[in-house]
Structures are given as structure tokens and as C-alpha cells.
Amino acid sequence: MSKTGMDLTRFILEEERKYPQATGSLSLALNTIASACKIIASHVRMAGLVDILGKAGKTNIQGEEVQKLDELSNEILIEHLSDCGEFYALASEELDEPIFPEKGKNGKYVISFDPLDGSSNIDVNVSIGTIFSIHKKVDGTVNDFLQEGYKQIAAGYVIYGSSTMLVYSTGNGVNGFTLDPSVGMFLLSHPDMKLPEKGKIYSINEANAKKWDINGLKEYIETLKDEGYTVRYIGSMVADVHRTLIKGGIFAYPSDIKNKNGKLRLLYEASPMAFLIEQAGGKATDGKQDILKIKPTDIHQRTPVFLGSKKEIDQLMEFIN
């Protein structure tokens, strides 16, 4: 097991050495993501001191109001990911269509990302984050993004909270790195992260309970209460999932009568988070099937999400099926 305190670049290179056929492309890609997120983190820390708070005066493809810091984060990621040459195409939650960078014409990968998850919480200083998902390029079209989640080469997130952490997986477990601002490096702080088999926390917006359209969900939540569970809901997916990854329990964002297909995005949020949760020993479902087995039909597809410890997810499925 790698030692706590190892810097991210060295960790990535040591992982690469385990695969003699590796070309270094994925290592460069992951380091590029980390570099871009360091810049975003610096802007987040300054958000209350410069004019990057508030709305940008436009809406994204989802019909949501774009925040200034959200827009800036998107631009930073596009610039860095386009320039590194490892990504054939980029898909952002904020853009209608994918970008095919000139420098990436020989790239091996495509990347989907949510530049600043939880952006509605920016103005009130709640933890927010960046989520990313990497697939191999297959045919050089938009279809490269429409691959099942289990085919992800890597996935992860960066959470900008009391500290900045990068958590990622390349399919060999999950590791977390905390940014040390004194040296400007991500250092291994959470090696080989594992979900507890069960937790004591459920995370769901119960204000929407009257609108839930999944049979048995209300009864399941009442059962958790009877078993002594407490509710913790931040409203920023990256923060809620980060807590679930560390402490166990369940995070849920179900479909309802207003959002029949759910609200979270499959490519940019649900699939990468499900990948991490399953790599850490948990489970993730849309209520019917494993999220990682869903084949997307649209780059902005939405899905219900239930993810967390095995005990809670197995119990959930008994109630709703």
C-alpha cells in the first residue's frame, strides 16, 4: 500500500509502472485534471473577495442559471484539457455539444465533467466540487460518450471544502489526496478508501417526499428512522457522496412526478460517482439496475440515483421492488 503523504504525481507514476504496456497518456491526463482543479480551488478560496460570485446572466443546456464561478471553472477545465493533447473530445455539463480539440486529434480518451457541482451553493460558502469521468475513444464520434459506466478508465472528483481533496479511481480501488497549500501539491491522505458495510446516515431531500413516485421509498426511509439513522443532506452531490464514501449509509436522489427521469446527469454525476462507490465496496442503482450498466442514449441524460453501503442499498431494493 502506498504511504500516506505521497504526492499525487508520484502515486500516479508508480501505478503506471504496474502496467508495462502503459504509454503515460493516462498519467498525463490525470495530472492535467489535478492542475486545473488547483487553479479552480484558488478561485474558490477567493470567491468572496473578487467579483466571481453571483449569477452570470445565462442558462446552461439544463435550463439552470449559470453561476459566474461555474462558468470560470468550465473555461479553466476546457483550456487545460484541450491543451494537454490526451483528450480526443470533451463533454461538459455546461455545453450543448462536445468539444473536439485540435491538439487532441491523436488523443486516446474522452472526458465528461461537471466543472462545479453544487454551484447553487457557491454564494453561501457550502462545499462544492468538480466531477470527471474518462472513457477510451472508440470511433471518434459523440458515441464515445455513450458508453456504459463500467467501461470508465478513470473517474473522480475534487471537493472544495474545509480542505481541497481529490478522490479518484482507475479501477483498482479508491484513493484520496488532500491539497497542501503550502507546497501546492495533492498528498495521499486517504489510501484505499472503503465504505463501511453499513452506516448510520441517510442523505435525501425529504422536502420532495410528497412528489416521490417510487413505490416503497417512503416506507424505506421511515424504516431507517426507526433503526436510528440520522439525516444529513447538504444539497451538493459531491459533498453528500464524499461523506457517504467515508462514513457509509446511503445517498439518494430519486425520480418524482416533476422529474420522471430523475434530476442528476448520468455522464457527469451519477456514473463517475457510482464507479467510485463500487470501487470502494459499495453499490449504486437507479432503483432497477446497476447505474454502471446503463447505456446512455444522450450526453445530457438524467437518472435516479441511489448509492452507498451494501446493507442500505440491498435493503432499499427489497422495499422498492
Image: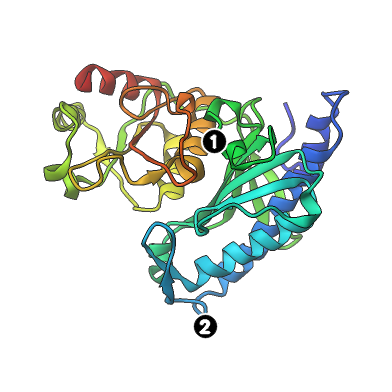
Q: Quadrant of the C terminus?
A: top left
Question: Can the viewer see residue 169?
Answer: no
Q: Quadrant of the N terminus?
A: top right
Mark 2: secondary structure: loop
| Total marks in image | 2
Which quadrant of the view contains residue 78?
bottom right
State the residue at coordinates (20%, 26%).
227
Residue annotated with mark 1: 146
Residue annotated with mark 2: 51
The one of 105 and 182 positioned closer to us in this rendering: 105
Q: Residues within 10 Å of mark 2 (few under 14, many from 20)?
A: few
Sequence-first tag of 2 and 1:
2
As displayed, is residue 215 above or below residue 314? below
Amino acid, disc 1: Leu
Left or right: 133 with respect to 102?
left
Which quadrant of the view contains residue 83?
bottom right
State the residue at coordinates (74%, 34%).
3
Give yes or no for contact between labels 2 and 1 (Cβ–Cβ under 8 Å): no
Number of the label disc, if any, that sits on residue 253: none
Left or right: 113 with respect to 53?
right
Percent x, y of residue 315: 27, 19
Q: Residues within 10 Å of mark 1 (few under 14, many from 20)?
A: some
As displayed, is residue 118 above or below residue 139? below
Percent x, y of residue 182: 72, 63
Amino acid, disc 2: Asp
Percent x, y of residue 312: 32, 24
User: Among all residues in the image, which is located at the extreme left?
Assistant: 210
